[in-house]
Image: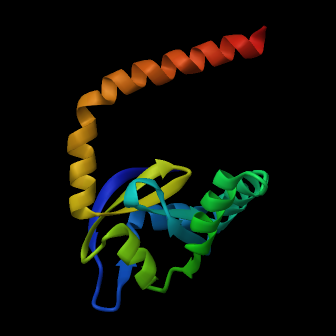
Amino acid sequence: MFYGEYEHALDNKDRLIIPAKFREIFKENYVEKFFITRGLDRCLFVFAEEEWKVQEQKFRSLSFTRGEARKFNRLYFSGAAEVICDKQGRILIPSYLKEYAEIKENVVIIGVSDRIEIWAKEKWQNFFRENMGSFEQLAEELVDQDEKNQKKREV
């Protein structure tokens, strides 16, 4: 659903314009409400409302008697904020999320299939530089693992 990489900057009111390509997808799918929260690797995750509900159900099913599940859910859901695009296609990023992701002004917005990720530009550049060299190796390992899991399910 969401693909690509876009560079943008926050305005002086901490609003971020969502790329036009993503706004088109929202319009085509009647998406008005989004949820933004702490992501992994110090980025922010943005989910359309429908996908947020899927994620919420998945994480809610984790046993609250497990310490790791409690910690994860607390950090993940306490950071969540409901956002709506204004008429110019902007969303407001809460200050605590800006601080978490170390966003000052320039960001990179990437589409990662079912979600959008917002990165501080420097953090994204570092992540990309450090991980692009292992792209092929990751692909081989993940595809091999997926094929093994597929065969197990068939048995």
Q: Relative to the observer, which residue lies in front, 40 or 15?
A: 40
- Tell whether 150 sits left or right of 121: right
**Vertical side of 72 occupied by 155: above or below:** above
What residue is shown at x 41% (from left), y 18% (from top)?
140
What residue is shown at x 44% (from left), y 75% (from top)?
97
- Tell whether 22 sits left or right of 56: left
- Residue 53 on image: x %, y %: 72, 62
Residue sitting at the far top = 155
Q: Relative to the observer, which residue lies in front, 58 or 78?
A: 78
- Residue 29 on image: x %, y %: 63, 62
Q: Quadrant of residue 42?
A: bottom left
- Residue 24 on image: x %, y %: 49, 64
Q: Name the image colouring.
A: rainbow
What residue is shown at x 53% (from left), y 70% (from top)?
36
Q: Quadrant of the C terminus?
A: top right
- Tell whether 47 sits left or right of 125: right
- Tell whether 134 sits left or right of 82: left
- Residue 1 on image: x %, y %: 53, 50
Q: Quadrant of residue 60?
A: bottom right
Q: Quadrant of residue 124?
A: bottom left
What residue is shown at x 28% (from left), y 38% (from top)?
131
**Vertical side of 119 occupied by 135: above or below:** above
Q: Is residue 99 visible?
A: yes
Q: Relative to the observer, which residue lies in front, 67 or 51?
A: 67
**Vertical side of 127 occupied by 86: above or below:** below
Q: Is residue 93 visible?
A: no
Q: In this figure, what is the number of numbered marks?
A: 0
